[in-house]
Image (cartoon, rainbow, N blue to C red):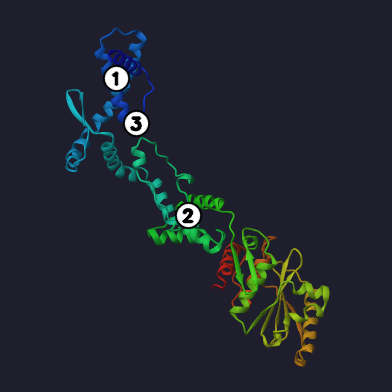
Amino acid sequence: MKKQKKILWRKGIHLAFSEKWNTGFGGFKKFCFHQHLCILKAKLGRPVTCSRQLRHFQCRKKALQIQNTWIQDAPFFAKTKSSVAAQNVGTLSTKVKRKNSKHFISSSRTLLRLQAERLLPSAKNSDHEYCGEKSILKAVADLPANNVLGQANGHRPRTEPQASDFPMKFNGESQSPGFLDEVMKKYGSLVPLSEKDVLGRLKDVFNEDFSNRKPFINREITNYRARHQKCNFRIFYNKHMLDMDDLATLDGQNWLNDQVINMYGELIMDAVPDKVHFFNSFFHRQLVTKGYNGVKRWTKKVDLFKKSLLLIPIHLEVHWSLITVTLSNRIISFYDSQGIHFKFCVENIRKYLLTEAREKNRPEFLQGWQTAVTKCIPQQKNDSDCGVFVLQYCKCLALEQPFQFSQEDMPRVRKRIYKELCECRLMD
């Protein structure tokens, strides 16, 4: 037994001169560990070499620095002493003598609770931006913000929130999906989401303008989009089907494909069914390659001459244009967002209408046709938005709305078309 005590005693002496000590909770264990071991060494009364004595003073100095920190917090502990006793919390108190004064240091668990209560108001004031950004993300992604106990545990707080601190859960991972999850579930991606939508959501929740936090919001949206790139999302409407590859043509400066053009034209027809007929984007190509017999059955169930407006998109490999036919005054108009006039396209449509009138026994439409080129219309300023302009022309003409849009409105128009396709209805 005595031999084991001597071994333990020597290990204690060795630890007393070692600087490899545990940090513990907020430095509490650090202070207690060194103070007791230094006292242990002093009680031994054995001679000390210079190197050991130097290490002793180094450890003692660090212990006293920590002790001074606790002494400065004495008024705080004095105020909370009675409340802690009232809660019947078992604490292990240690008396520390410093300058003939007594100070009580509670156990690590109670001390952690007191630290958190004390740090809470100061954290709200000193780190207002950090907590504010957590509140913003909680509103956008419906996430629980971290409490202040992490700072009381001795961890150093970051001045800027990281993306890893805010895991945005996707469909099925959370029973209460956040705002971004709702957008993903409804639209399959964040393409139709704009800063205005996010700021509007934040204003509804906090009744405050968060326009000064745009960089943080955009960064979190970008990180969320990077984590949810793959999505098996499809839209079915009548005979049309759009997947994410089709909808992706509405993102950025991509060129619109035939599937997007045709389904949007179907939405326009259903919005005004007795007035407008929208031709498939492959109609003109089929007419040119196979003649009237190649498209004769395309209007088998439709009487074109009972409509008031015909919309015919023209796709010439790398460019979209639009031909409209007003049946009331027999005018064939050509719309192009780059000011180009393809006369052969207009002539092809005129010949088709004459042949269709003969086949349907409508002699009143065999003469009186005129052609026109509409020039005073919004024009594109790039090489990628011609399809978006064509769809916007079609919508305005079908709903009898003025052309009040420009190139600067195209990003917003792309997002609106994306939403209309996903919701299968036209928006104002």
Which residue bears the numbered disc 2? Answer: 173
Asked whether residue 367 appears in the rendered view, the answer is no
Q: Is residue 38 visible?
A: yes
Measured as percent of width and height from the top left, residue 171 is found at 50, 57
* Amino acid marked by disc 1: Leu
| Distance between mark 3 and mark 1 Cα atoms | 16 Å
x, y (%) of residue 355?
80, 85
Distance between the alpha carbons at the discs numbered 2 and 1: 50 Å
What's the residue at 70%, 86% (across, down)? 303
Residue bearing mark 3: 24
Q: Is residue 19 above or below residue 235?
A: above
Q: Residue at 31% of width from left, 44% of height from top?
A: 120
In the image, 61 versus 31, the foreground residue is 31
Vertical order, 120 against 12 (above or below): below
Q: Is residue 329 left or right of residue 187?
A: right
Give the residue number, with chain letter if any, for mark 1: 37
**Which of marks 1 and 2 precedes in the sequence?**
1
Real-space Cα distance between discs 3 and 2?
35 Å
Q: Are marks 3 and 1 in contact (CB under 8 Å)?
A: no
The disc label shown at residue 4, or none: none
198, above or below 337, in the image: above
Return the x and y of residue 296 as percentages of the image width and height: 78, 81
Marked residue nearer the N-terminal end (3 or 2): 3
Q: Residue at x 59, y 55 (%)?
A: 230
The answer to which image quadrant residue 308 occupies is: bottom right
Q: Position of residue 391 (x, y in %)?
A: 64, 70
Amino acid beneath label 3: Gly
